[in-house]
Image (spheres, rainbow, N blue to C red):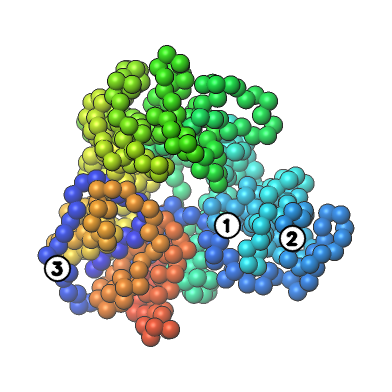
Amino acid sequence: MATVSSHCFFRHLTATLVPPRIPKFRASTSLSFSTVSCSLAQEEDLERVHPNGNDNTSSITTNNGKSSSYFPKRGQTLELVCESLAFKGKGLCKVTDTGFVVMCDRALPGERFIGRVTRKKGNYAEVTKVKTISPPRDIVDAPCEYASHCGGCKTQNLSYEAQLGAKEDQVHELVVHVGRFSSKELESEGVMKPIVPCDIQFHYRNKMEFSFGPYKWLPKESLHEREAGRDNYALGLHVPGFFDKIMNVDKCLLQSDPANKVLAAIQDCWRDPQFDFSPYDVHSHKGFLKHLMLRTGRDVVTGHPEVMVNFVTSSYKPELLKFLVDKVSAFPEVVSIMNNVNSSVGNTSVGEEEYTLYGKSFITETLRGLTFQISANSFFQTNTRQAEVLYELIEKYAGISGDGSEVVLDLFCGTGTIGLTLARSVKHVYGYEVVPQAIADAHPNRPGMHMKLIKFLLKLRVPRIVYVSCNPATCARDLDYLCHGVAEQNIEGCYKLSFVDLQSPFHVKRA
């Protein structure tokens, strides 16, 4: 039996598990795949879903009534209707006269609007919304004042129920069109399971990263409010699509209340000229303060919040940070203040050197009875509550008998949190990492499984695979390979898709 977690989360800075060798299995093979925190459909899969742009018409009509070519030109304005949500929450829309497919950021299902074409990509185009003609379905008031411009919560003005439905639809489309499973097969055999919602929609993130910058970004309608000098410094979140534009943020509804108190305290004083704090400029590569990372955990005894404050700077100057350290250490929830020194021109928050400025070098968190020490650069599931739900689903689909006879392979294990939660019920857990340093460092999301691993699993024919993914597009591709094989490489699949559970693992059995 194997638990395959090809995932982009559950990373931590603790020990790696290294087995002496891979054990051999003799059993019928089953494959369970589940998706956690489903992202929406990949742009590269759009052509497979809408290969011909729908209608047979060969022209479209612009807002001035003139006919033009079937493919709209850059700068052209179109009347559009958003039909569904796609990759990263972009609206999948169609030209009202022709059905030509376009993608629009911040367009919501049911919304009719005027959009201006910004660029073409193959057989679809991208547009920017100019004016809403009629509002979308399921619209709600966004509680965050930054929601209309921030890239973190683009669909905050869409009801949570509608967001869940959109994610279900996207995963279904990917499993059908990329994974090559028929809708009839998925529905008749009960493979697709309802998405598992989170019981809280705000204040669930245990980690947020903010950036310092020399200039606040302001929307066009607020440019007259631009201030001069140090008052124009920014500490906040990047504007979507720009590495050098930072929107000042005083409060983020995704992180915990204690973390927001720390953020507000730093915002209140760091621009004061008497402290001579300089924000890092990504163009000139000058400045001291680069990032502010806030992490929240729980005391294992009291259950009270623990906050880690991590200042990422371009050099090591503890005397310069002393005022900020004294300021935030006054909060009882703050138990750790760290300083990561990143002298490179890169925009990463991981430093070449790390120093403890106050308290301990980690915070703690508990998952399913296990206690984890989380350091500044650890990778850890950002939604702790849903991680509990995820782990329960993984254990369910793993089908562990409980007699202590089974062996679990935790592939791409990161810190090994998935395997560790199963360890109490099995004989052995072997954790594998493709990159030796991945246990100690945070790394980008993996684009699914490598073909070598696909071939290995098809040869190994383990009884069951539980596949945890936060990228449903690459997950659907891997399901296709494992279940249907790869014809061009003369590879035959040997697994059967059992369950697709939209919060946690896909479950697949050997056919």
- Amino acid under disc 3: Arg
Separation of residues labelled 3 and 2 (CA atoms): 58 Å
The number of discs equals 3
Q: In this orientation, which residue lies closer to the viewer: 23 or 217?
A: 217
Q: Which of marks 3 and 2 is in front?
A: 2
Residues at marks 1 and 2, CA–CA distance in whole angstroms: 22 Å
Would you say residue 223 is visible in this rendering? yes
Note whether 21 is above or below 505 in the view shown.
Answer: below
Q: Which residue is farthest right?
A: 65
Task: Identify the residue position indicated by label 3 in the image.
Answer: 21
182 in relation to 84, above or below: below
- The residue singled out by tag 2 in the image is 73
Marked residue nearer the N-terminal end (1 or 2): 2
Residue found at x 34% / y 38% = 343
Q: In which quarter of the image is the C terminus?
A: bottom left
Residue 131 x, y percent position in the rendering: 75, 44
Quadrant in the picture for the N terminus:
bottom left
Give me the residue at 35% from left, 68% from top: 450
As drawn, is 132 to the left or to the right of 291?
right
Q: Where is residue 499 in the image (x, y as percent from the top left)?
A: 40, 66
Residue kind at label 2, given as amino acid type: Lys
Q: Which amino acid does label 1 sit on?
A: Ala
Q: Residue at x 43, y 33 (%)?
A: 286
Given residues 204 and 334, the one toward you in this image is 334
Q: Which of marks 1 and 2 is in front?
A: 2
Q: Do the residues labelled 3 and 2 touch (CB within 8 Å)?
A: no
x and y, in percent, of residue 212 in the image: 46, 32
**For the residues marked 3 and 1, what is the alpha-carbon distance in whole angstroms?**
42 Å
The residue where tag 1 is placed is: 86
